[in-house]
């Protein structure tokens, strides 16, 4: 997926939001905005939003010296999500269709995204998504392939959401590799966040190698690419991973909530839609 | 009023909006965003948002060669406002307090502001503002000073709103000088728009000399400054003029709707508030 014109003002908004989390020094924040503004000319529209957006966080790191602006927020999100774990686990166990319920819960966790907005209510959103209609729901394909699969690559997105991913991984109950970002970017999960979410108890954890808020295959490690190419199923969570993998050369199941109108338009669904969509369907079954 | 950090991403959003009105060539629009982005480093936070924002429109003019991006929109806004003229004139004439009603209508016209957003419904907003509580309502001072005044300087804001300004000028019925921008910027009125709004029939029209979407006294013509300093009353419409004149060294009556949260915070009112506020009140009556 390319970077749309609307993404460029959004990068400035993200820069301001992340800069304010990192420092209260307004001169420093202005310096960040100056540099992000100037870097727009070096962001080609042909690159993915995740690739271009990564520059914002590089600039914040270099100007402030702060490696992980969202560290505290991520810890809080994981804590909040963990407090809901038992309640949601029961929801899944008591459900007529535990897999569907676990998918809905995993998508609900995708609301914890400080790249798009900071106004959300996790508990309310979970309850809503449990009953929301899907805009895409390739559930039959997903179930069939899950049943046959031996290895699953699950590409995580945000910290906190990671706890909800654990519930889906437990429900699927197959050998799973869970991939995180190489370095902190927005509130995306890195290794430490995955461990804090107890994902190491249900999956093998790896870094994708990507330093962007998404999965950019040209940045990924050989170890990750090998798993990406060989896994029976790839589950990709969230918008950033969708941006990087929407043109990937293999089947990918995208699980996300379409939170920004650019992603929603790209998927041809209304903003706020929930999605379980297999990419590559037509080629696969051609 | 200074430029707040939140204004910088907003300049990028404004740039994209105005660029799209001016050209459909995405390469040219990206070039505009590149240049506006790079110009942020040349926008000091100590300057007013109107002064910094003016650079956005200079860049659009220089890259596209289009002098007045909002020309068609301004003509449509004036046409739509004129269609409401008789209806609103009757509202004022039948009102128990024609001056207050005319003030409310003039403020309602301030919603026609393509710098802040493009989603408004003029007719609905007029009806709402006729009954909305004021966040500031220095009506007694305004009435007293109007009654004593011989000359009024009325600083216009947006095209279309200009037709509603005419209703207030007719209701006040004193010698009025109506000031417009020197060159087109966003959908602010220039001389041609004031004439199309029939303001020449009720006021002497002048250019303020300001090339920004507001009144920057350091850019204004000597002719305007002379009138600004000598007029018995200055009425300033809208956010842009407020940005430039909120620290002015004389009494100014601000009439506006606080549409963006930066202006609302500066006035210490909720977004959406309607305002009739005399600036310089404390010094004047000290």
Image (tube, coloured by chain):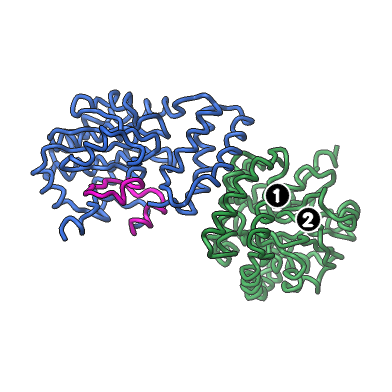
Chain colours: A green, B blue
Circles 1 and 2: CB atoms closer than 8 Å: yes
Q: CA distance from mark 1 to mark 2?
A: 10 Å
Q: Position of residue B91 (x, y in %)?
A: 18, 37
Query: Neighbour class for label 1 at 10 Å: few (<14), some, many (≥20)?
Result: many
Q: Vertical placement of B284 versus B13: above or below? A: below
At 43% from the left edge and 46% from the top edge, which residue is drawn? B49
Q: Earlier in the sequence, mark 1 or mark 2?
A: 1
Chain at numbered mark 2:
A
Q: Position of residue A154 (x, y in %)?
A: 79, 59
Query: How many circles with numbers are drawn on the protein?
Result: 2
Q: Which stretch did the figure color magenta?
A: B242-268
The answer to if B222 sits in the magenta stretch is no
- Residue on which the image places disc 2: A210
At 80% from the left edge and 63% from the top edge, which residue is drawn? A178
The answer to if B243 sits in the magenta stretch is yes
* Relative horizontal placement of residue A144, taking residue B192 as reference (left or right): right
Element carrying mark 1: helix
- Residue on which the image places disc 1: A50
Q: Position of residue A194 (x, y in %)?
A: 75, 69
Q: Position of residue A116 (x, y in %)?
A: 59, 54
Element carrying mark 2: loop
Mark drawn on residue A1: none
* Relative horizontal placement of residue B257, taking residue A161 as reference (left or right): left
Query: Neighbour class for label 2 at 10 Å: few (<14), some, many (≥20)?
Result: many
Which residue is nearer to you in this view: B17 or A108? B17
């Amino acid at each position: 997926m390319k970077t749309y014109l609307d993404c460029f003002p959004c990068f400035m908004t993200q820069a301001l939001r992340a800069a304010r989390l990192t420092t209260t020094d307004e001169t420093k924040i202005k310096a960040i905005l100056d540099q992000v503004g100037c870097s727009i000319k070096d962001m080609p529209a042909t690159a993915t939003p995740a690739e271009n957006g990564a520059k914002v966080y590089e600039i914040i790191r270099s100007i402030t010296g702060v490696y992980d602006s969202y560290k505290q927020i991520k810890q809080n999100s994981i804590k909040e999500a963990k407090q809901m774990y038992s309640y949601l686990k029961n929801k899944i166990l008591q459900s007529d269709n535990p897999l569907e319920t676990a998918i809905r819960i995993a998508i609900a966790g995708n609301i914890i995204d400080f790249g798009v907005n900071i106004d959300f209510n996790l508990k309310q959103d979970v309850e809503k998504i449990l009953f929301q209609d899907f805009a895409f729901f390739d559930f039959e394909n997903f179930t069939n392939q899950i049943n046959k699969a031996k290895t699953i690559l699950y590409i995580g997105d945000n910290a906190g959401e990671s706890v909800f991913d654990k519930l889906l991984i437990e429900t699927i109950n197959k050998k799973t590799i869970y991939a995180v970002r190489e370095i902190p970017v927005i509130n995306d999960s890195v290794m430490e966040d995955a461990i804090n979410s107890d994902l190491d108890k249900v999956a093998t954890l790896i870094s994708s190698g990507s330093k962007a808020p998404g999965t950019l295959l040209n940045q990924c490690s050989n170890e990750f690419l090998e798993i990406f190419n060989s896994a029976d199923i790839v589950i990709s969570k969230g918008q950033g991973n969708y941006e990087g993998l929407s043109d990937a050369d293999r089947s990918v199941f995208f699980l996300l909530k379409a939170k920004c109108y650019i992603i929603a338009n790209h998927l041809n669904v209304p903003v706020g839609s929930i999605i379980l969509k297999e990419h590559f369907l037509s080629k696969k079954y051609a």
